[in-house]
Every structure is written in C-alpha cells, then in structure tokens.
Amino acid sequence: MSPGPAGAGRPAGAPSGAPAAAALALLVAVGVSAAFPLADENQFRLALALLLAMGAAGRLLSRTGDFGRLALILLGGYLSLRYWTFRTFETLAYTGVWDVIFLLLLYLAETYGIATHLIGLFVNVAPLERRPAPLPADPARWPTVDVLVPTLNEPLDILRITLTACVQLDYPREKLAVFVLDDGGTAQRLNDPDPRRAAAACERSRKLRELAASLGVHYRTREHNLHAKAGNLNAALGVAVEDARGGRTAPARNPGLGESHPQGELLLVLDCDHVPTRDFLRNTVGFFLADERLATVQTPHFFINPTPVEKNLGTAGESPGENEMFYGAIQLGLDFWNASFFCGSAALLRRRALVEIGGLVEDTITEDAGTALRLHASGWRSLYLNKAMTMGLSPESFDSFIIQRSRWAKGMIQILLLHNPLRLPGLSVAQRLCYLNACLFWLFGFARLIFFLSPLMFLVFNLRVYNASLAQVLAYAVPHLVASYFVSNRLYGRFRHPFTSELFEIIQSIYLIPAVLSVFLRPRAPRFRVTPKTASLEQDTLTHLATPFYLMLLLNLLAFCAGAILYLNRPVLLDTIAICLCWNTFNLFLVVCCLGVVWERRQLRRTHRITPREGVHLVDRRRGTRVDAVLRDLSVTGAGFEIADRAPLLSGRLELEALDSSGRLHRLPLRLVRIEPFGGGVRVGCRFEDEDEAVRRAIVDYVYGDSARWKYFADLRQVREVGTVRALVRLTATGIRASLRHAAGLLRWVAGRRIRGYRRAA
C-alpha cells in the first residue's frame, strides 16, 4: 500500500508496511491456536508466561519500534482470544430462563468489547506520522483555495475571530477567497411565522453581512435549511440538494450579492469556532500537488478549553484531553490503511472529488464520516497530518456535551445501517474494518449498561450470569483484562490514561442508548443539532441530567447490602460473591466520578485564555521605557504578564513587543488594568486597545496565528504514561473530591432555599 504522496510520507524511523503485513499473516494462526483447550493450571502458566513476554515487549517498544509494537499486539490479542474461546465453549451452560437471558447479555457485551478491542489493535498496528508537504517555489503553480465557514446561530464575536484569521492566511491573495455560509439568514428563517424569531434572524443576517463586507469576506445564504451543514455546503458548491419529497433541487442563487460563489480547486472547511493559523495552507496544499487522487487532508481538532467532564472533575492538565487519543493515535493508524476520516472541519478537500461523488453526504447527520466513506469507495485517497493548525471550542456544559455526542452516535449508526461498509463496493478489506470499528464503537452504551447491571443481577437476584470458578477467572479473565489494559496503556498511554475511557463511556451511555435505539427504529429520522458554545454559568449548579446517576449510586449501595446478606445465607458462594463485590466496587468508583461530572463548575469567562510562557517586552508609550516580561496568559481581549522588577515604571498606556516562532515582530497597544505583587516581582494585567480594525486583525494574528504555540500546548497535554494501579488510585481520589464538592454544593443549595423560604414567610 502506498504511504501517500511523494515527499510527504514517512519520516525516518516511521513504521513501514512490514509489521502490518506480518500481522495480517499471523492473525489466522493466532485465532486457530487460541481455541486449543488446556487444563486450568496449564492455562494459568501460559497466561503468566505471555504476560511476562508482554512486559518484555513493552520495554522493547521504545527501542525496536515496529517489532515491539507488533509483538505486544499479537500477545495481548492472543490472550483476549483465549478468554473469548473459553467464554464461548465452557461458560454458556443453561441453568434457568432468567439466568440464561442475563448470561447471554453479558456474553454478548464481552464479545462486543473484545471484537472492538481486536479490530482497534489491527487499525493501529502501524501509525503513520507525516511531515508537512512543501509547496513549489513558483506560486503560479499553487492551486486556488476557497475557505468555507458554515454558520447557523453562533455568536458573531466567535465568527469575527475566525473570519479575521481566514483572511490573514499566508497564501497569495489572488488565489484565496473566504466565504461565510449563513444558514441563519435563509429565506426560510427570515420569513419565520414567529415574528420574534424572524426579527432576530433578520438582525443577525444584517450584522453578519456588515461583518463580512468589512473583512472582505463573501456572504452567501440559501432559500431553505435543507440537510443542515451538508446541505449548506452543497448549496454553496452548486451541488443539487435533495428536497423534502426526495427529489433534487438546484441550489438557490445568492440574492442581492451577484454570482460570487466558491470556485477554487481546493476547499478549506472550518467550523465557525475553528480559528486557523497563518501556515495552514502552506503545510497542506502541497499534498494535493503530489497526488492527483488525493481527496482530503485532515488535521487535528485542537480545543483551547477542556470538555465539561474534565472541567467539572478538575482533571484538565493532569491527564490528556478526551480528543487526544483520536487525533493523536487513532487517526495515524487509520492513515496507514488509507482510511483517515474527514472530521467536518480543519480539513482541506479537493473540489473535483466532492463534485464527482455528488457533494457531501446528506442522509446522515455525521456528513463528514459519510462523505469520507463515499470518497474512499470511489477510489479517492485521504491522509492525516498530525499538526494542530486550528483552535476550536469544546462544549461548555454537560448538556451540550451530550448533545454533541448523541449526534455523533446517531450519525455513525446511520452510516452502519444506510451505507454498510462491509457491503459497500470499492473499499479494501482494511478500510471496511476501519469504518466498521468507527461505527460499532458507538454501541458502547449497551455494553456499559450490561457491565454495570451484571454484578447486581447475582448479588440482588442470585442469577448465575457467569458460570466459572475462581480458578478459571484467574486463568482466563484476569490475564485478558491485564493484557488489554497493558496493551492500551503502552500504545495509547500518552493520549489516554487507564480507566479514562470507562469513565467517558459510562457518563455518556445512559443518554446514548435511547439515541442509538431511535436510529435503529428510524434510520432516516435523526436531525442535525448544532452544539451550543460559549455557555456561561454564574455559579456551580446541578445539571438536569444528573438523576440517572443518583439511581446508579443507590443500586451500587444496594448491591453491597445484598452481597452481605447473600454471604450470611450461602457462605459457600464466597468466591463468586467476592468477585461480584470487587466488580461492583469498580462500578461504584465510576459512578462517584459521574456525580462529580454532573455538578457543573461555574464558567464566567466568555473569552478563553491560553497560558504561554513566552518572553516579551512591555514598552511604556508615555515614558518610552522598556521592560522585560513573561507572557503568562493571553486572549483576544487582554494579556497577563510577570515582571521580575518589583517596582517597574509603567503608566496606563503600554505596547506589547513580541516575536513569534517565525521571527515576525508584533506590536500591540495595551492599557494597564491592574498591577499586584508576586514573588520577587509583580503581575500585570492589561487589556488590548482594539478600536481600530487593523489593530483587531493584528491581535487575532498574534493570538491565533502561530501554529508553534498550539504544538507547545499539545505537547503539554500529552502527560506521561501512568500505571494501571496509579491510574485507579487517581480515579478514586478524583471521584471522592468531586463527590464531596457535589455534596457540599447540594447542602448550600438546600440551605439557600430554606433561608429564602424563611424570608418569604417573614
């Protein structure tokens, strides 16, 4: 398989195709040998030997690269297959109707988990790390590029920053055009039957037109809001859109704005909160010149703020961000198999490829993955460049987080049902497995619910959901679990700590199960919902989605009581009771963390700040003095500095002088807001003076334009690996802290209500 465009493939030391080919050749042999029966004591010896061999392979991984990685994957996969064959042929005995129902549910959940684990190992057998592709020295050979920024109802302040960065991309002006595609200003919305909604749409449309005109950005809208983001992009590209009756209609003309529409050879698609760095096109356009069949170049989605789960638990900075595993590891593995996904934003696409397949896919609400699937099936190629060159915003509230994840889950299940990758012509075997893995992942909610209920079924109702002795559990189940965690930690430990996946899955599962079920019942029914951004909370509060986790906590506590009663009545079942209580304890840890997540921490800052540690100069514009300083926080509204001098001579009007990674000098006007002692010096807080449009552009360029800054923060988030035991201790401590904060908040809330009640009574 070709590694990609000439001159843009693997750097020295990156994986070659040899380990992947060897893995494919060995999979059949591994699967067959995993079914050989062994006595329990011999299986225990084999498992112990394989775990020791995995430990050795893990140590070799950093030195031998491909060989150590392949050995680790094969050994870990073999232990998991041994466990699955044991479960399949030795534990599925019939002991009663209700017993067998829950026994089969648990078996299916485990089978699902093992299958997705093994397919995931295959997908990530040889991750491909690429370098940016160089452009020809002659700019005349560079293709034309259109930047497309679709929007619906997002705040104009966010759009202003993104559009300002877009018009400052480092690319020839005559070859670059920026378009804002306003689905909030369609004729359908401007003529809404509700006068208030119609007036709000008209006002927003007017302001957005003025903003676009001031920046030199083309404004486009359409008649109807058909097929959400996919329909919006297709209408702008001149691709026919399917109407409500299933027919195809020509895209609406852009009323009053002439015929300006995207015509570039390449298309840069950006969500309205994804701010590009200056060098985005310089680093990506060259790939298309090297490969005529290349359709997409995807780059990471880098988020400046933590997810609500990380924010509410207080783990931001202690563990990698939630998206780091997908963009830092999985996409690199997909790239090896020519199966890297288009993720809807921060991606460059070839216009001709989109037109050839009929535009973006409109029958799924994850139009990005659906479009990538159709492109791959049509023989087009994709690649992934692991270089953060956009800055976006994660959902601010837990409610918004669930809305976003529900959309992803529904859309991927739609792809599975409507465009089954196992049957779709044109895909390679590896591509089918990659897409199947991406779709099946979103069924995790069902497995997580079964794993939570299974120990309860035995402890409370005495149902035999798992027919195995303690010796068999130690010989088969424990080695499988240890191997799975060890492999995952060695392969992805820089991007995902142990047990973090379990936490993220259980916190979503309760809400994703009904969402996924609705798609199975009506595959074409889901509708696109925009993820709310820039939510603000004045104080800590309990989300309205918290109720299921209180119920789960009560069930956990009930299981402990039931286990004690069961032991008193049937002490002969001590082994099974002990296993189920340990299982229930682990579930309790996760539920305790969930209670911390649903207690929302306040969020007052509307403009998120980054925390660089860069040397800069502050110039007093009145006195002309110049002071060395360290930039410690930064946003488009202001900046904070540390100055070693305890009493610097500063007036109210300052100027920031700073060099970026490319050597560009930035001079920005500041107004002093506060100054306070700190250590041996002072901390200074300033606001940017941005009344002038040129200054506003310069501020956006300085804050968001340097991709080296995002690399610095991405490297900081890749916290070093932690062991499984240490990760479990951290999880427990995090859950306890979060739950105590939750309980204290509830007590304050109850006390506040009583005080208000007394005042009203008085």
Image (cartoon, rainbow, N blue to C red):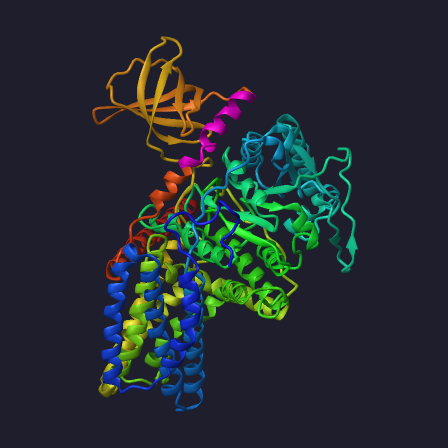
Task: Give 382 or 463, whichever is nearer the viewer.
Answer: 382
The C terminus - image quarter: top left
Residue sitting farthest toward the left: 680
Q: Which residues are magenta?
A: 693-709
Task: Give 691 or 295, whichever is nearer the viewer.
Answer: 295
Relative placement, left or right, of 169 versus 506 is right
Task: Give 593 or 23, whichever is nearer the viewer.
Answer: 23
Relative placement, left or right, of 355 versus 398 is right
Q: Position of residue 759 (x, y in %)?
A: 40, 44
Residue at 78% from the left image edge and 58% from the top image edge: 247
Q: How many marks?
A: 0
Relative placement, left or right, of 374 versus 475 is right
Asked if 387 appears above or below 550 in the picture, the reply is above
Is residue 506 visible to us here? no
Asked if 132 appears above or below 309 in the picture, the reply is above
Q: Position of residue 319 (x, y in %)?
A: 33, 50
Task: Give 108 or 287, whichever is nearer the viewer.
Answer: 287
Q: Residue 81: which quarter of the image?
A: bottom left
Q: Position of residue 421 (x, y in %)?
A: 58, 66
- The main secondary structure of the magenta stretch is helix
Magenta-span inclusion, residue 720 = no
Q: Residue 190: which quarter of the image?
A: top right
Residue at 35% from the left image edge and 59% from the top image edge: 66
Asked if 88 appears above or below 637 in the picture, the reply is below
Is residue 394 visible to us here? yes
Q: Residue 456: which quarter of the image?
A: bottom left
Residue at 28% from the left image edge and 24% from the top image edge: 676
Q: Position of residue 599 (x, y in %)?
A: 39, 52
